[in-house]
Image (tube, coloured by chain):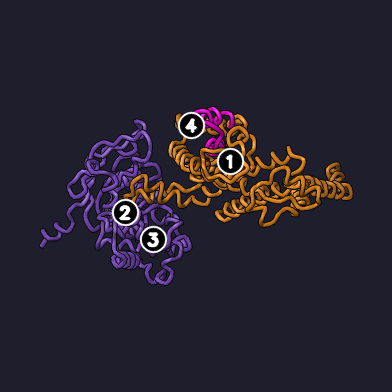
Amino acid sequence: MEAIQALKNQDHSGRRQLKDKLFFYGIIVLSLVTISPIILIISKLVVEGYRQISLDFLIQTTPDTFEAMTAVSNGEKIPGGIANGIVGTLLMVVLASAMAIPIGILTGIFLYENQGKFMANLTRNISDILQGIPSIVLGLISYLWVVKHVTSGFSALAGSVSLAIMMLPMIVRSTEETLKMIPQTLKEAALALGVPYHKVILRVLVPTGFSGLLTGILLGISRILGETAPLLLTALGSSVISLDITKPTSAIPLLIWEFYNDPNMVDLIWSSSLLLMAIVLILNIVSKQIAAKRK
Amino acid sequence: MTNSIAEVKKPILSIKDLSIAYDKHYAVKNVSVEIKKNTVTAIMGPSGCGKSTLLRALNRMHELYENITTEGEALLNGQNIYDISPIKLRRHMGMVFQRPNPFPTMSIYDNVIAGYKLNGIRTKKKERDEIVERSLRDVALWDEVKDSLYKKGTFLSGGQQQRLCIARALAFSPEVILMDEPTSALDPIATSKVEDLLVKLKENYTIVLVTHNMSQAARISDYSLFMYLGELVEYGKTKNMFTNPIDPRTEEYLTGKFG
């Protein structure tokens, strides 16, 4: 008994408070370490890239290396812009979304409706594996399927097929997770009104989970926006604006790679990266906002 | 004179030898009952006695579960409900659930008219307005929500939401309304409002109600079924059953010996 009293009366408060403080500041320092890369990246992009950002940058096509060299040697701004890349990226994202969103949502509905069944489990696992496939491999596959056999040459279509395969598992997963969060009672309410099954899904469950589906789609888009490797093997790149899906097209990340390989275009690397980063960041913030609103 | 009374109380729903099994395990065993028109019929019994399964079998919602087998028949106005499509049947049999479940993406107005909208039944704006007003008046919700018809139904209180769900079922003018413990998620004041409503509604509708709450059954039902382990133990006028139960198991349940 006395021993316990003695233990109780020991005063460790000084040491404990010190430990507490160390822990607290440790957490702050490590959190700063985590956020510092993004701050460093954004500041670097802004500092190096803002000079090239102008209206021309958005609506002109890329200059050739000679024009750029002249401008750089005269100490002027590099003329032209990356409109061919912006248009190409938009074109391929729209095409990829048109392929991946309907298939992804329908697959997600299938998984939700068949919880625990063999085919659904198999599909879910395969979709997860698909998410882990390196993007360059998807590029190779799309090269084999589309470039060689469908468009007989590098094309926007081939690029968007590889991007669509990348998007697909994300949409499947987010659709299933979203639908799972909708209470079963809502489905019963609609069925009890004599509503046919397909309308219950399309007019009750999908609208109820709409913001969840949208979040998944936006995250999927922001993921494929920056993909470069599969596009090198499929869309190839182009110095003109092209809306023909059977012809090669450019994309913002492809242009960044091209600028990197051309010593005269260095300044354009930063401004293109800044634009790409800004789009991805905005998409991420928007989808986070939508997701937060749901809760 | 007596003939005309018998005429009014003719059965709308005759359940004959109905058995329902999940994976060979019988949840409802050989139940035969005649539900009379314009009455409130309560289904009572301890948890797991099959009362919800029996109720859900009446609009074939039990078929949503897997590995279900149904034997016997249930006649709605003389027609076997297992011979017509569940979609058609459910338009004659409204259902209200334990927890209020208005559609969260729809306004109050759209929730009431949801049965028409989701089924693609074309109606004129004037007809729709009439249906919404009539249904909301029927559940005594009209005065409370008439100025906020285009707000989301989920902004209402729990009791109002449940009355909205009843209005949604009434909008279709069903013959029978099935209720699965409709007040179990409500507070006492909201419960008494819903109970008053049910007594009023039986003038135009037939109500079958599953309840855990014996005093609720005593307060509002005309007929009662007592079920135990899937069997129908006793069926009769509520007054008789509560004052003078025939089966000893009913008496034990009513006096609180089990359940």
- Which numbered tag is attached to residue B120? 2
Amino acid at pointer 4: Val
> Is A157 contained in the magenta span?
yes
Chain coloured orange in this rendering: A
The stretch of residues the image draws in magenta is A139-164
- Which comes sooner in the sequence, label 2 or label 3? 3
Residues behind callouts 2 and 3 on a single chain: yes
Label 3 marks a residue whose chain is B
- Say yes or no: labels 3 and 1 on the same chain: no
- Mark 2 or 1: the one toward you: 1
Do the residues at pointers 2 and 1 share their chain? no
Q: Which mark is residue B110?
A: 3
Image vertical order of residue B125 relative to residue A179, above or below: below
| Residue at (68% x, 46% y) in the render | A63
Q: Is residue A176 left or right of residue B173?
A: right
Residue A216 vs B38, above or below: the answer is above
